[in-house]
C-alpha cells in the first residue's frame, strides 16, 4: 500500500503568543489571525479534493494524502498545519483507485444507534479517530445525524435513526470519541438532507417550528453532546435556498441561536455562489473541483477587495477555522502518518462489540434461537455468507485488509464497489458448531435451497440489501427476488432463521412463516463473528430498533418517493407535511400498526420493567424504575421512557424522553433513572424562539418499545415554563 508521508512542519516557535497552550482557543485564534496576510486567510477557507480527478483533468495538492477526501493548506510559517480530511463516520475511508487505504470498519451508523448505548458509540468514535490520526488525518468527515424521515434513503445506514434524542446522543458520543484523538469531527449534513434522489436539486419545505422539533433538534443535541469543530452544510435546498448559502440555517440557527463557534464547511459540490454563500455563513468551500467554480478562490478575493464580502467576514471565516484547530488540539498535537502503529486486532474487537450490541432480534418463535448442540444439520443459504458481510456504498466506504471478499458485483464504480468484508458468517458458524454438519448453498437455485432446508435441523438464510450514497431504493422489498427464496426455504422448514444485512427497514412478506429474524445491519469488520455469536447465544442480543419498520410503503407520509427515479438537473419539491411527526410519531398519529415498532428488540431472556416513579424538581421531570431479569441468562435491556401530554397538543401523541441500557443478571433487578430534557416536553415558538411547556398533566411511560403492550405509566403535573432556544429556563409560572 502506497502512503504519502508528507507532514506540515511548523516554523513558529513556542515563544509566539498564539502557541501558548494556557490561552483560550478564541484568544489564540485572534492572535495568529493578526499576523496573517489576506492570501493566507483565503487559503484557510478553500479546500481541495485529496485525489486526482481525471474527468476534470485535475491533480490533488502535493501535500495531500493520496486518495483522500480533502485537503486545506495551512500557514506553516505561523505554526498552523494543513488540514488533511478523511471520510467518514464508519472508519477511515479511501477514495477508489490503485492505492486504497485499509482500515477498521465499524458497523453502520444505524447499527450503532441500535445499541442505544452512548458508551459503545463513544468507543467506536475513539477507535476510528485513532486510526484517522495514525494515517495522518486531522479532520474526520463524520457525525452524520440526518433523521430517518424517508426509509428508502440510500444513505440511512450512515445515520442515527428516526428520533432526535436517540440520534443526537449516539452521534454526539461518536463525535466526542473521534475528537478525543485531537482530530476534528464534523457534524453533518446541515440540514434536512433526508433523501438522496435529487439531493442537489430538491427543495424541502418545512416550517421552522417543525424543523426545530425534528431534524434540527437531532443536530442540536449532537452538537451539544459532541462539541464538533466543524459543521458540514448539505446539498439540498431548504425552503427555496441552498443549505450552503442559507442564512437562516447557518447564521441564525447554527451560529446565533446555538452559539456554534467552529467553522461551516460545504459538502463536496454543494456551493453555488461566492458572495451569497460567504455572507450567509459558509466559512469554507470543500473538495474542489466538485463545484462548478472555485467560488472561494479568486472570486472570493475579488469580492473581499471590492467590498461585496466585508473583510471582517473573511476574518471571521478564518478565525473559526483557527479556533477549532486550537480548541481540539490540531495545532498543539500535529499529526504524522504512522499506520504501522495501528492495533488492528484491538480495533477489530471494538467493531465486534458494536456489532454484537446493535444486532436486533426481531422475532424468535418457539425459541428457535439460540442454536445449540442438538442441532446436527445446519443449512446456510444465500447472502454470500461463505465469503463475508455486506457494507454500504459511497463516501463512507472503508476498504478492509484482505480486500473485497466478493469482487465484481455492480456497481463497481462509485457509489460502489459493492463491498463484502472478509468475515465469513459460514466460517464462524462452523467454528461454533463443531459437532454439526454445516452445508452452504448460494440460493441461486431456489428448489435446491428448499431441498437442502428440508433435510436440515435448522436453516439460516442470509438476505441482503445494498444501499449507498447518491441513490435511494425504489421500495422496501428485498432486491433480487430474495423474498421468494426465503418463502421457498421457510415452506420447506419452519425452523428457518433469516439474517438481514440491510441499510434500513425492509418489508417481510414471509414473516409469519419463519421461526426467527435477526437484523444484523451492515455489521463491519468483525460482522461474521458477531452474527455467529448471536445465533449461538455466546452473546445475548440486546439491540433495539432505532427506526420503525413499516408494513408497506402505503403507511409512509409519501408512499411514492418524490423525485424517484431522478432525472439529471431536474428541480423538484418535497413537502415535509408530517412536520415533526417522524417515524413512530407518524405511526402513532395516524393509528398505523408497523411491521416492527421503533424501540423493539428481543432477548434470550425475559425482562420486566416496574416500580416507575416520576417527580418534578424545578420544572425538570425525573423518572426512576427497576429492570428485572426474570429469565435464566444474563442480558442487557433498553428501558425507554416516553412522555405524553394529557391535554396539550403535540405533533404526535408521545415522544421519547429518555433511555438507558442496563446489564442484569438472572433473577436480579437493577435500578435506573432518566432526567428529561425540558425541550422534549415543549413546543417551539418560531417567532419568540422559545421552547414553551404548557401547564398540565403529562404521562410518563416506561416501555420496551414505542408500541409495548406491557408499558407502565404514571402522571406528573407541570407548571407553564418558557426555555430559551438552547433549553435554558427563562421563566416559570408556579401556581400556588
Image (tube, grey):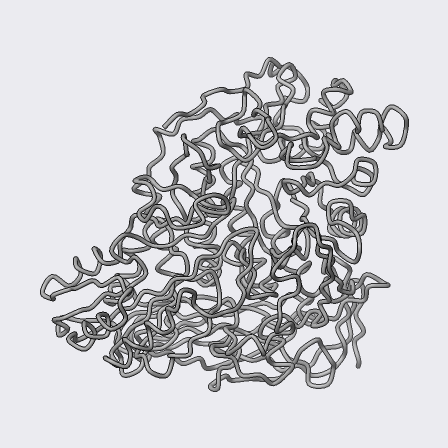
Q: Is 88 above or below relative to 541?
A: above
Residue, x 12% and y 71% (percent of image)?
Answer: 376
Camera-nearest residue between 554 and 20: 554
- Residue 311 image offset from top left, x and y in percent: 85, 28
Residue, x 52% and y 27% (percent of image)?
Answer: 333
Quadrant hosting residue 70: top right
Residue, x 24% and y 56% (percent of image)?
Answer: 386
Q: Is 452 above or below relative to 524?
A: below
Q: Is 53 above or below relative to 561?
A: above
Determine if residue 716 is in view: no
Residue extending farthest right: 307
- Residue 2 image offset from top left, x and y in percent: 39, 25
Camera-nearest residue between 158 and 684: 158
Residue extending farthest left: 435
The answer to whether residue 365 is left or right of residue 581 is: left
- Residue 171 image offset from top left, x and y in percent: 54, 53
Q: Is 505 above or below relative to 703?
A: above
The answer to whether residue 215 is left or right of residue 162 is: right
Pick the quarter of the image with the N terminus.
top left
- Residue 417 image offset from top left, x and y in percent: 43, 46
Amino acid at each position: 500500500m502506497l502512503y504519502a508521508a508528507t507532514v506540515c512542519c511548523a516554523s513558529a516557535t513556542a515563544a509566539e503568543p498564539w502557541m501558548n497552550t494556557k490561552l483560550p482557543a478564541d484568544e489564540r485564534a485572534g492572535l495568529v489571525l493578526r499576523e496573517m496576510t489576506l492570501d493566507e486567510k483565503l487559503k484557510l477557507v478553500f479546500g481541495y479534493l485529496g485525489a486526482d480527478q481525471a474527468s476534470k483533468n485535475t491533480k490533488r495538492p502535493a501535500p495531500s494524502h493520496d486518495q483522500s477526501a480533502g485537503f486545506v493548506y495551512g500557514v506553516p510559517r505561523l505554526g498552523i498545519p494543513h488540514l488533511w480530511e478523511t471520510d467518514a463516520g464508519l472508519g477511515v475511508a479511501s477514495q477508489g483507485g490503485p492505492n486504497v487505504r485499509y482500515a477498521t470498519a465499524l458497523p453502520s451508523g444505524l447499527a450503532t444507534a441500535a445499541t442505544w448505548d452512548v458508551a459503545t458509540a463513544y468507543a467506536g468514535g475513539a477507535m476510528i479517530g485513532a486510526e484517522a490520526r495514525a494515517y495522518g488525518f486531522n479532520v474526520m468527515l463524520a457525525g452524520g445525524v440526518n433523521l430517518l424521515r424517508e426509509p428508502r434513503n440510500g444513505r440511512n445506514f450512515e445515520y442515527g435513526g428516526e428520533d432526535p434524542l436517540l440520534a443526537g446522543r449516539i452521534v454526539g458520543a461518536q463525535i466526542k470519541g473521534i475528537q478525543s484523538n485531537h482530530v476534528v469531527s464534523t457534524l453533518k449534513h446541515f440540514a434536512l438532507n433526508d433523501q438522496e434522489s435529487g439531493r442537489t436539486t430538491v427543495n424541502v419545505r418545512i416550517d421552522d417550528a417543525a424543523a426545530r422539533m425534528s431534524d434540527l433538534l437531532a443536530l442540536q443535541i449532537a452538537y451539544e453532546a459532541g462539541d464538533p469543530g466543524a459543521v458540514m452544510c448539505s446539498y439540498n435546498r431548504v425552503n427555496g435556498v441552498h443549505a450552503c448559502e442559507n442564512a437562516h440555517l447557518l447564521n441564525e440557527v447554527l451560529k446565533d441561536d446555538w452559539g456554534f463557534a467552529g467553522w461551516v464547511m460545504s459538502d463536496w459540490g454543494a456551493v453555488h455562489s461566492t458572495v451569497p454563500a460567504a455572507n450567509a455563513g459558509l466559512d469554507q468551500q470543500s473538495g474542489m473541483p466538485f463545484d462548478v467554480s472555485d467560488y472561494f478562490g479568486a472570486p472570493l478575493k475579488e469580492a473581499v477587495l471590492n467590498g461585496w464580502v466585508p473583510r471582517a467576514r473573511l476574518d471571521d471565516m478564518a478565525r473559526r477555522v483557527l479556533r477549532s484547530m486550537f480548541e481540539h488540539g490540531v495545532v498543539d498535537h500535529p499529526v504524522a502518518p504512522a499506520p504501522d502503529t495501528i492495533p488492528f486486532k484491538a480495533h477489530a474487537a471494538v467493531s465486534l462489540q458494536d456489532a454484537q450490541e446493535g444486532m436486533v432480534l426481531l422475532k424468535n418463535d418457539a425459541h428457535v434461537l439460540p442454536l445449540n448442540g442438538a442441532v446436527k444439520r445446519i443449512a446456510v443459504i444465500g447472502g454470500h455468507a461463505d465469503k463475508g458481510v455486506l457494507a454500504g456504498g459511497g463516501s463512507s466506504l472503508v476498504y478492509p485488509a484482505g480486500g473485497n471478499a466478493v469482487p465484481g458485483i455492480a456497481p463497481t464504480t462509485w457509489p460502489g464497489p459493492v463491498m463484502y468484508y472478509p468475515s465469513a458468517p459460514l466460517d464462524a458458524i462452523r467454528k461454533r458448531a463443531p459437532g454439526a454438519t454445516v452445508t452452504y448453498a448460494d440460493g441461486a437455485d431456489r428448489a435446491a435451497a428448499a431441498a437442502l432446508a428440508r433435510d436440515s435441523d435448522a436453516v439460516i438464510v442470509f438476505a441482503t440489501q445494498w444501499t449507498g450514497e447518491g441513490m435511494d431504493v425504489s421500495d422496501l422489498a428485498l432486491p433480487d427476488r430474495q423474498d421468494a427464496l426465503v418463502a421457498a426455504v421457510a415452506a420447506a422448514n419452519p425452523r428457518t432463521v433469516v439474517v438481514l444485512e440491510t441499510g434500513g427497514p425492509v418489508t417481510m412478506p414471509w414473516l409469519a412463516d419463519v421461526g426467527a429474524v435477526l437484523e444484523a445491519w451492515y455489521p463491519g469488520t468483525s460482522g461474521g463473528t458477531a452474527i455467529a455469536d448471536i445465533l449461538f447465544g455466546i452473546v445475548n442480543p440486546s439491540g433495539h430498533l432505532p427506526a420503525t419498520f413499516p408494513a408497506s410503503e402505503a403507511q409512509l407520509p409519501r408512499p411514492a418517493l418524490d423525485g424517484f427515479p431522478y432525472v439529471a438537473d431536474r428541480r423538484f419539491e418535497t413537502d415535509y407535511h408530517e412536520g415533526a411527526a417522524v417515524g413512530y410519531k407518524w405511526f402513532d398519529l395516524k393509528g398505523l400498526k408497523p411491521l416492527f415498532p421503533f424501540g423493539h428488540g428481543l432477548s434470550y431472556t425475559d425482562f420486566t420493567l416496574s416500580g416507575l416513579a416520576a417527580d418534578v424538581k424545578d420544572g425538570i421531570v425525573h423518572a426512576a424504575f427497576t429492570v428485572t431479569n426474570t429469565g435464566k441468562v444474563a442480558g442487557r435491556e433498553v428501558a425507554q421512557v416516553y412522555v405524553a401530554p394529557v391535554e396539550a397538543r403535540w405533533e404526535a401523541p408521545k415522544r421519547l424522553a429518555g433511555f438507558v441500557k442496563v446489564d442484569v443478571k438472572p433473577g436480579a433487578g437493577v435500578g435506573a433513572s432518566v432526567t428529561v430534557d425540558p425541550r422534549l416536553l415543549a413546543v417551539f415558538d418560531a417567532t419568540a424562539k422559545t421552547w414553551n411547556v404548557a401547564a398540565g398533566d403529562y404521562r410518563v411511560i416506561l416501555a420496551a418499545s414505542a408500541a409495548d403492550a406491557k408499558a407502565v405509566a404514571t402522571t406528573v403535573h407541570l407548571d407553564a415554563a418558557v426555555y430559551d432556544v438552547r433549553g435554558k429556563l427563562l421563566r416559570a409560572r408556579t401556581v400556588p
